[in-house]
Image: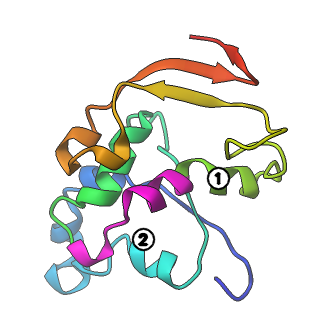
Amino acid sequence: MQRFGIIASVQPRFVYSDYWASERLGAGRLSQLYPFASMSKAGIMLTAGSDCPVEDPNPFEGIWSAIARPGLDQKERLTVGESLVAYTKNPAYACFSEGFRGTLSPGYAADMVVLDGDPYESNVESLRKIRVLRTIIAGKVVS
């Protein structure tokens, strides 16, 4: 995937909701489920989403799932930074808008949220409790 520039669109929330995986895959293959860290280390670009309406659209549920990996191999955990990039910068690249979206940079669209907590300062469990206080799109407060 890395060699050919294939972007992996992943839904980290499935880590939490695929409680049936052990039963269907067996213990021997469970460690290979959702190998996000291995993919990232191999240079594969990850873009993260929710697969809404199947899963909760709250990105912090997905970020928490990618970092906590409840019930799955912990060696495949993403960091907070890797998770945030997978939900912000990388999707902008995947939809050809990396020149004006995806990061807070001069001349960019100023799409952002104001949060009630700092994901980098949060422990794993408090990540899923972070809430959006304001949403700003193209520099305008929309909620």
List the single residue furthest toward the front.
106
Q: From where the camera sits, is residue 129 visible?
A: yes
Q: Horizontally, is 18 left or right of 28 in the view?
A: right
Measured as percent of width and height from the top left, residue 130 is found at: 32, 31
Q: Magenta stretch? A: 74-86
**Where does the C terminus fall, quadrant-wise?**
top right
Task: Give the x, y percent position of residue 35.
Answer: 38, 75
Q: Which residue is mark 2?
A: 36
Q: Taking 114 as reference, is 59 above or below it?
A: below
Would you say the magenta stretch is mainly helix, strand or loop?
helix
Which of discs 2 and 1 lies nearer the camera? The answer is 1
Locate the N terminus and report the quarter of the image it occupies.
bottom right
Q: Splitting the image into 4 quarters, where does residue 33 fall? A: bottom left
Residue 54 visible in rendering: no
Quarter where residue 30 is shown: bottom left
Q: Position of residue 62 (x, y in %)?
A: 38, 47
Vertical side of 130 occupied by 22: above or below: below
Name the residue located 40 percent from the left edge and 74 percent from the top edge: 37
Nearest the camera: 89 or 21? Answer: 89
Q: Residue at x 72, y 50 (%)?
A: 92
Q: Which residue is mark 1?
A: 89
Left or right: residue 92 compared with residue 14:
right
Q: Residue at x 64, y 13 (%)?
A: 141
Q: Tell me if residue 84 comes above or below residue 38 in the rendering.
A: above
Residue type indicated by callout 2: Phe
Q: Nearer the viewer, residue 15 or 44?
A: 44
Q: Which sits in the foreground, 96 or 113? A: 113
